[in-house]
C-alpha cells in the first residue's frame, strides 16, 4: 500500500509540470514539448533561443535542486548493459522524430488540448513501452 509520503513528491512534480506547461502556453503561446524545444535549441538561434535555453536549464536545475534538498540521487542501473541504454536513447530520439513530439508535448500538452494526434501518439508510446518492458524483462531477463 502506498503511503501519502510516497505520493506527495509525484503529485508535486505533476503540478509543477502542469504549471510550467500552462505558463509556457499562456505566456509565450508555445507547447512545452521537450524534444521540440531541444531540437529548436540545437538547430536554430532565432527569437525563441533564449526561452529554449532557460527552459532546458530549468529542467536540469529543477532535477538538481530536488536531489540536493531531498537527498535522493539517481542510482545507475548496474545490471543493465550500457550499450542497451545507448540504443534505447537512440530509439527514443527516433520515435520522437517520427511522432513529431514526445511524451511532454503529446502526453501533457496534446492530451490536455484533446488532440486526436496526441491520443494516437500516446497510445503508441504506452503500447511500445509495455511491449519493450515485457520483452526485456521476460525474454531477455534483464532487470
Image (tube, rainbow, N blue to C red):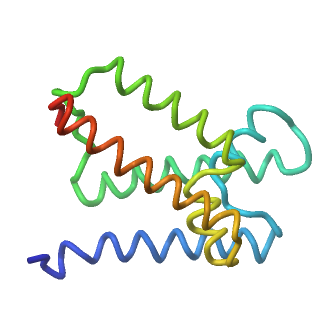
Rendered position, 68 above or below 12: above
Residue closest to the eye, 12 or 100: 100
Q: Position of residue 107 (x, y in %)?
A: 56, 64
Nearer to the camera, 104 or 70: 104
Along the horizontal axis of the image, is 80 left or right of 59? left
Residue closest to the far top: 83
Q: Residue at x 20, y 28 (%)?
A: 140
* Residue at image point 70% right, 77% down: 113
The image quarter in which residue 109 lies: bottom right
Residue placed furthest toward the left: 1
Count of residue discs: 0
Q: Which image quarter holds the C terminus?
A: top left
Residue found at x 52% / y 27%: 90
Q: Quadrant of the N terminus?
A: bottom left
Question: Is residue 105 placed above or below 102 in the rendered structure?
Answer: below
Residue 32, horizontal then vertical, whole percent = 67, 61
Measuring 52% from the left and 31% from the top, which residue is drawn there? 91
* Quadrant housing residue 71: bottom left
Residue 50: give x, y in percent of width and height: 79, 48
Q: Point out residue 114 in the picture as x, y percentages from the top left corner.
A: 68, 78
Q: Which residue reaches farthest bottom?
A: 4
Q: Which of these two is toward me, 122 or 81?
A: 122
Indicate whether 21 appears above or below 55: below
As drawn, is 90 to the left or to the right of 35? left
Amino acid at each position: 500500500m502506498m503511503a501519502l509520503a510516497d505520493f506527495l513528491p509525484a503529485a508535486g512534480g505533476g503540478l509543477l509540470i502542469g504549471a510550467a506547461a500552462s505558463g509556457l502556453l499562456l505566456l509565450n503561446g508555445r507547447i512545452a514539448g521537450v524534444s521540440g524545444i531541444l531540437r529548436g535549441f540545437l538547430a536554430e538561434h532565432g527569437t525563441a533561443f533564449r526561452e529554449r535555453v532557460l527552459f532546458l536549464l530549468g529542467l536540469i536545475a529543477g532535477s538538481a535542486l530536488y536531489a540536493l534538498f531531498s537527498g535522493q540521487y539517481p542510482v545507475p542501473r548496474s545490471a543493465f548493459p550500457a550499450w542497451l541504454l545507448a540504443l534505447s536513447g537512440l530509439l527514443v530520439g527516433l520515435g520522437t522524430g517520427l511522432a513529431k513530439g514526445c511524451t511532454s508535448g503529446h502526453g501533457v500538452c496534446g492530451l490536455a488540448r484533446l488532440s486526436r494526434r496526441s491520443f494516437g501518439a500516446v497510445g503508441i508510446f504506452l503500447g511500445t513501452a509495455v511491449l519493450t518492458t515485457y520483452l526485456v524483462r521476460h525474454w531477455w531477463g534483464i532487470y
